Amino acid sequence: MNDEMKEIFSMIPENIGNILKEQGILELRPSQKKSIKKGLFSNSNNQIVCTPTGSGKTLVAELAMLDTIINKKKKVLYVVPLKALASEKFREFSETYGAEFTVKISVGDATDERFTNNFDVLMLTSEKLDSMIRHSRDFLDDVGLVVADEVHLINDETRGATLEVLLSIFKAKYPKIRIIGLSATIGNAEEICEWLDADLVYDEWRPVELHHLVLSGDELSRYK
């Protein structure tokens, strides 16, 4: 482990750092380092993480989740735009962190009160969360973190309004609930950060170099 990573790991709570080491994670990607340096563990500020696909945004959310559940003794809502994505994240988190905390999923049309107190992380769509809040907000008393995956969809004409209303509720009524927004394509990150009073974690590093090519007839050439 180089000196930079030793410094980064010194900013991570020891129990969370041990979990990373058990998973064989001894090196972090640029966005993850920036998030930690901006206070992922040292303060409760909201963060918007805007980096390319595959650059490690999800691990930032996972680190915040672990700290919220293990150290702060609070619950986490992981909000995604699609039921399929909720199911995918549910499987991933259950396999990776099943020994650390309880992961549940709720994406059905009916409000399911079973999850009110019986989860550490609840995977759900914004529409489902909206329905649950309309029925009862009591379960939010134990929530310490909301992860908004694909937060750029707040600009979507058909589904963005629901996410915007939800984030507005958390901002106005539950300021102690931290918000971590993840996006690879958000175009107005600074505006959203100003609205949510959030720190922007921005980085252009990607695991695979992006090439721009132009096809003209039968010839493919690099775009300059």
Image: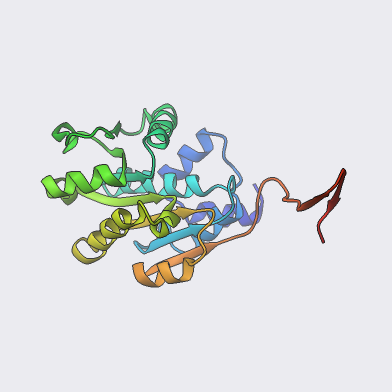
Vertical placement of residue 96 versus 8, above or below: above
Residue 20 percent across, percent down from the top left: 50, 40
> What quarter of the picture does the C terminus occupy?
bottom right
* Residue farthest toward the right in the current orientation of the protein: 219
> Seen in the image, is 195 located left or right of residue 133?
right
* Residue farthest toward the front in the current orientation of the protein: 217
Vertical placement of residue 59 versus 7, above or below: above
Rendered residue at 36%/48% (across/down): 67
Residue 17 percent across, percent down from the top left: 47, 44
Rendered residue at 55%/47% (across/down): 56
Q: Quadrant of residue 86?
A: top left
Is residue 211 or residue 177 the one in the foreground? 211
Is residue 137 or residue 222 the one in the foreground? 222
> Seen in the image, is 13 located left or right of residue 31?
left
Rendered residue at 32%/51% (across/down): 146
Rendered residue at 79%/51% (across/down): 213
> Seen in the image, is 83 located left or right of residue 212?
left
Is residue 188 or residue 50 the one in the foreground? 188
Residue 115 percent across, percent down from the top left: 19, 35
Q: Quadrant of residue 8?
A: bottom right
Vertical placement of residue 209 versus 169, above or below: above
Is residue 17 or residue 129 the one in the foreground? 129
Residue 73 percent across, percent down from the top left: 25, 46
